[in-house]
Image (cartoon, grey):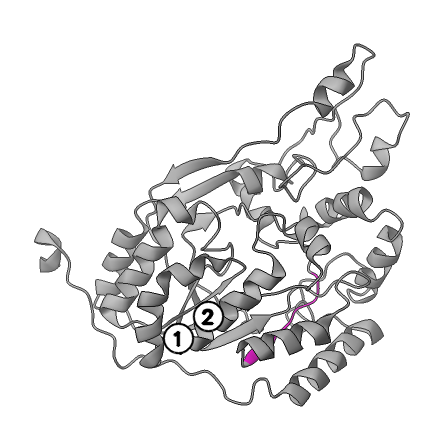
């Protein structure tokens, strides 16, 4: 045991350590110790065929952990974000995107930001009831609410649990404006709610397409929808009159190299707004991403990280509000120039999306709660 993160270099062939390898359907290759742990464990081949046993283990299954939330609307005052209120039905995300900046939040649950983040999903089963109470408060003032701002509100467990559906039903009932960002075609299920809300200036959807490269997508975002399927979702939403934007986040040097092609395909499908961020590697996301590079792109690993650090003032990550989304330096500026030129040429972001808060109707509480 040791007190530091397991380094990819420590798993070199012949070292005795169990080597890192891709896990089917998962983004992370390990249960990386979180930053509050004083010890971390590494698999070690002791000569008794334990290495073979490790490699033969089935992929970890997804476990849902129920949570009774006390509050569900979070407020944000970060100057570099367009939203100031958000709501997340889930903590953790089965999509398994290796770069997800929300991974470190699992550390507060004493769980790994690695495989635990993808396989141990916290579901707020009372989210609609708590949201109703918060919207009913006389002190509540409506503003656009971002649903699924940290983890995807349409990740696979939503098909069964329908927590996101229950939230949108309430927002529809109260005429409350909302937006959401997703990598899933599951959003199409709720068009019956989103379309009439959009017609009244109450809803918009953003679909993330990091790259059109299906093989890269399968490695970066293993349980999210394929790129062509996300384009079909954009088209379906747009045809139903729902304002659709495309997110090209994150941009990763020497990996996601088809920004212009993504924008062209999204425009053709019906998206009319677009934005991007560069790769962010806060806390444990840094070592997890380095592990991922060693497993999938070892020959490119040093080159990728050198450019990432170039955009972060020589570090893996810089939390400064002025630069954390777009980066700094020549490489960051090149990415920005490419985006601006392509977006302008195609016609993106010509009309600013607005949300109407004047239609909001405070919900009634059932029973005695309506007296307070």
Q: Position of residue 200 (x, y in %)?
A: 31, 81
Relative to 242, 350 lies left or right? right
Residue that numbered label 2 is attached to: 236
Q: Is residue 289 magenta?
A: no
| Residue 322: quarter of image | bottom right
- Marks 2,1: beta carbons within 8 A: yes
Q: Nearer the viewer, residue 196 or 66?
A: 196
Residue 350, placed above or below residue 229: below
Mark 1: secondary structure: loop
Q: Quadrant of the C terminus?
A: bottom left
Q: Residues within 10 Å of mark 2 (few under 14, many from 20)?
A: some
Q: Position of residue 244 (x, y in %)?
A: 49, 75
Label annotation for residue 240:
1
Q: Can see residue 283?
A: no
Mark 2: secondary structure: helix
Query: Magenta stretch?
Result: 273-279
Residue 337, placed above or below residue 87: below
Relative to 16, 152 lies left or right? left
């Amino acid at each position: 045991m040791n007190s530091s993160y397991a380094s990819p270099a420590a798993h070199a062939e012949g070292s005795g350590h169990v080597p890192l390898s891709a896990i089917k359907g998962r983004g992370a290759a390990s249960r990386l110790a979180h930053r509050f742990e004083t010890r971390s464990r590494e698999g070690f081949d002791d000569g008794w065929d334990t290495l073979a046993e490790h490699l033969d283990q089935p992929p970890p299954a997804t476990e849902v952990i129920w949570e009774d939330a006390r509050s569900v609307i979070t407020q944000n005052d970060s100057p570099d974000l367009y939203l100031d209120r958000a709501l997340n039905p889930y903590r953790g995300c089965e999509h398994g995107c290796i770069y997800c900046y929300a991974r470190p939040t699992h550390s507060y649950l004493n769980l790994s930001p690695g495989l635990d983040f993808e396989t141990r999903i916290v579901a707020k089963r009372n989210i609609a009831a708590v949201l109703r109470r918060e919207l009913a408060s006389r002190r509540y003032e409506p503003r656009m609410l971002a649903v699924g701002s940290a983890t995807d509100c349409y990740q696979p467990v939503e098909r069964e649990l329908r927590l996101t559906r229950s939230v949108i039903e309430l927002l529809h009932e109260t005429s409350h404006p909302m937006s959401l960002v997703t990598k899933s075609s599951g959003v199409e299920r709720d068009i019956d709610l989103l379309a009439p809300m959009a017609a009244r200036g109450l809803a918009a959807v953003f679909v993330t397409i990091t790259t059109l490269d299906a093989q890269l997508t399968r490695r970066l975002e293993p349980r999210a929808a394929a790129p062509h399927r996300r384009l079909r979702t954009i088209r379906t939403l747009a045809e139903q009159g729902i304002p659709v934007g495309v997110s090209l986040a994150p941009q990763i040097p020497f990996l996601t190299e088809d920004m212009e092609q993504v924008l062209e395909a999204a425009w053709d499908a019906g998206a009319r707004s677009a934005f991007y961020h560069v790769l962010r590697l806060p806390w444990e996301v840094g070592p997890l991403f380095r592990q991922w590079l060693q497993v999938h792109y070892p020959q490119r690993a040093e080159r990728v990280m050198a450019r990432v650090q170039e955009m972060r003032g020589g570090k893996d990550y810089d939390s400064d509000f002025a630069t954390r989304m777009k980066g700094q330096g020549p490489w960051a500026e090149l990415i920005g120039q490419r985006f601006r030129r392509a977006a302008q040429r195609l016609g993106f972001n010509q009309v600013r999306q607005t949300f109407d808060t004047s239609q909001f109707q405070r919900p009634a509480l059932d029973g005695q709660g309506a007296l307070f």
